[in-house]
Amino acid sequence: MENIKFSVFDIFAYLLPGSIVLLAMFLFLTQNVVDVSLYLEMAKNISLGLGIILVMVAYIIGNAVDNFGSWLYYKIGCKIWGEPYPKEQHPTLSHAQQRALIREQSPENFVFIHTWKVLKTMSHNLSFGMLLVAIVSFIRYAQHQDTVWITMTIASTILAIVFLKRASVYDKWHYKELLETVEVLQLEKRVSLMSSEKRKSGK
């Protein structure tokens, strides 16, 4: 079940953002279509086979643009809302070592903490996708002076900012709970060792 769960998360991290980027590409390549309602008519005529192909293409595009989404988050998002790492760092364990410890000692918590990281990936990829839609919509507005396109530009820009902010929030939650879980696990380990030593001394 855990493997299935991760697969579903991966689809959300890449498929949804890939669909947005695919939409932006489609809008850019169909500049001869002026009326937005025509796009709705095109969507109604998509067959099952074509729909499956589009899903596969969107997933591939989502994987491809992940690097761009990460760049947008770390180069812009982190400068605006700060680094995701908490001020209190673990004195001896790196983040990779903390994840390894949780994965080994508490798989349930590892799944929960990993969820925040996947949501962060989905958010910054969606932010990049919405930014592309905003750019293409602005180009279309400059060509046709249609208020629908400028509305899409504004809405997409706002959503790009919102998604980038959510990526920052999810990433901070990830590192905060990562550190807290490690501290709890090590505390439990110390208590267990103390109890074991007391039992031995009692004998």
Image: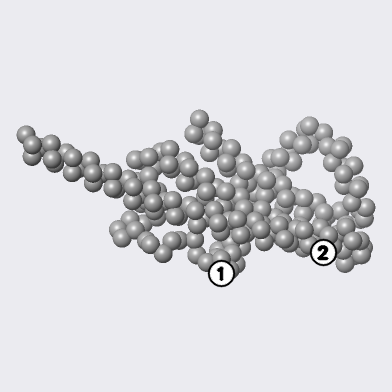
x and y percentages locating residue 21 in the rendered image: 72, 52
* Secondary element type, mark 1: helix
Residue 28's tag is none
Q: Quadrant of the C terminus?
A: top left
Report x, y in % for residue 30.
86, 53
Above or below 118: residue 168: below
Secondary structure of the residue carrying numbered label 2: helix
Whole-angstrom CA distance, mark 2 to mark 1, is 26 Å
Q: Quick check: 83 above or below 173?
A: below
The earlier-in-sequence mark between 2 and 1 is 1
For badge 2, the amino acid type reads Phe
Three-letter amino acid code of the residue under disc 1: Lys
Q: Which circle, 2 or 1, is nearer the viewer?
A: 1
Q: Residue at x 26, y 44 (%)?
A: 189
Residue receiving disc 1: 79
- The residue pinned by badge 2 equals 138
Tell me, what colour scheme is on the image?
Answer: one colour
Q: Residue furthest top?
A: 1
